[in-house]
Image (spheres, grey):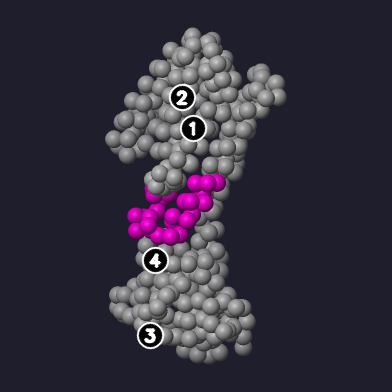
Amino acid sequence: MLMRLLSAAPFVGGTFYMVLLRLADWPLLGAVGAVIFAAVGLALLILRRERLASPIHWGFFIFTGVAAGLVWTGPGWGAALVAGYPAVFLYGSLLLIAVVPPFLGRGYFTYYFAKKTQPEAVWATDVFVTINRHLNWFWAVLFVLGGLSGLVPGLFGLQGPVWEPIFDGALPLALILGLGAPVTKWYPEYYQRRLGVVPTGQAESTSVPAEGRPTGGAPAAKTCRELIEMMPRGFNAQAVGDLAAVYQFDITGDEEFTAHLAIADGKCDFHDGPAENPGVTVKSPADVWLAVSRGEKDGQTAFMAGEYTVTGDVTLLMKLNSLFSPAPA
């Protein structure tokens, strides 16, 4: 219960101060801002010790500090500026937490939230990093739009109890809840689906659509090696176009081998051993890759659980569905 209250403190304190900036007199704002800033800072120290301090918490902390500092200068340009555009300072502070860490090599602010829902095994994968990079900059755009919304009352003379709450609070909040939250929930699955990691029930198979399935009465693969050797039989030459690519498979567990498929000139050939320069490499235990290819294991769940990994040009993985669909009868 205490941690929940402390976790809410930066949001409640920052929001309360933003409202006061629109309503109260300058002398009062400086003292109140200092108290709120100190309280938020204390809450963050405790949350940080418990590893519960999120980047958004820090964004609100920056906002209260900057706003209180400007107001504390007295009834001058600083106080007038922050009192006239509190939402600009709030979303500007949140923008900093999205923009600055990547340029300092500290990663994306969305990591904090994504790592709470995904196993550690996938944190270093290209797909996890790419998804968070996209979402990080998506949220940066939302923060910019929130700040621009806060400019409207002052620039267009729309001050008052009706317009200020709309442009300072309601409109930015609608962007966050109506657009930001749904996209954050939807996009990871969408991106993985594009890569061929399709959730169960939404396609004929999961990650390896049809490579290991029999066509034209051919027997199904009994081993992972047979599966990969059989993939050229289901190669769809009509879908390849001018693509030239190499898919490498590093298989471990019950079977241990490395093999690759070379696609060029409208043909697909199986080769033993590693490729000189593979375009994409799948690293998986034999039983996992075989189960995924047969549709016995959900490919998305296996991938996000770190049961198999993919390195290299992940866009090539997107082409598996079309390149290795069953050949026409």
Q: Earlier in the sequence, mark 3 or mark 1?
A: 1
- Binning the other alpha carbons within 10 Å of mark 1 as few (below 14), some (14 to 19) or many (20 upward) gives many
Q: Earlier in the sequence, mark 3 or mark 4?
A: 3
Query: What is the spatial separation of the Cα atoms under label 2 and label 4, in whole angstroms?
Result: 44 Å
Which residue occupies the foreground of this view, 232 or 325?
Answer: 232
Q: Earlier in the sequence, mark 2 or mark 3?
A: 2
In what quadrant of the picture does the N terminus appear?
top left
- Residue 140's place in the image compared with 273, above or below, is above
Q: What amino acid type is highlighted by mark number 4?
A: Thr
Query: What is the spatial separation of the Cα atoms under label 3 and label 4, in whole angstroms?
Result: 20 Å
Asked which secondary structure carries label 2, the reply is: helix
Q: What amino acid type is highlighted by mark number 3?
A: Asp
Q: What amino acid type is highlighted by mark number 1?
A: Ser
**What is the span of residues highlighted in magenta in the rendered image?**
112-138
User: Residue 327: x percent and y percent?
Assistant: 58, 85
User: Residue 165: x percent and y percent?
Assistant: 62, 24
Asked which secondary structure carries label 3, the reply is: strand
User: Residue 233: x percent and y percent?
Assistant: 52, 87
Asked which secondary structure carries label 4, the reply is: strand
- Which of labels 4 and 1 is toward the front? 1
- Cβ–Cβ under 8 Å for marks 1 and 2: yes
**Mark carried by residue 309:** 4
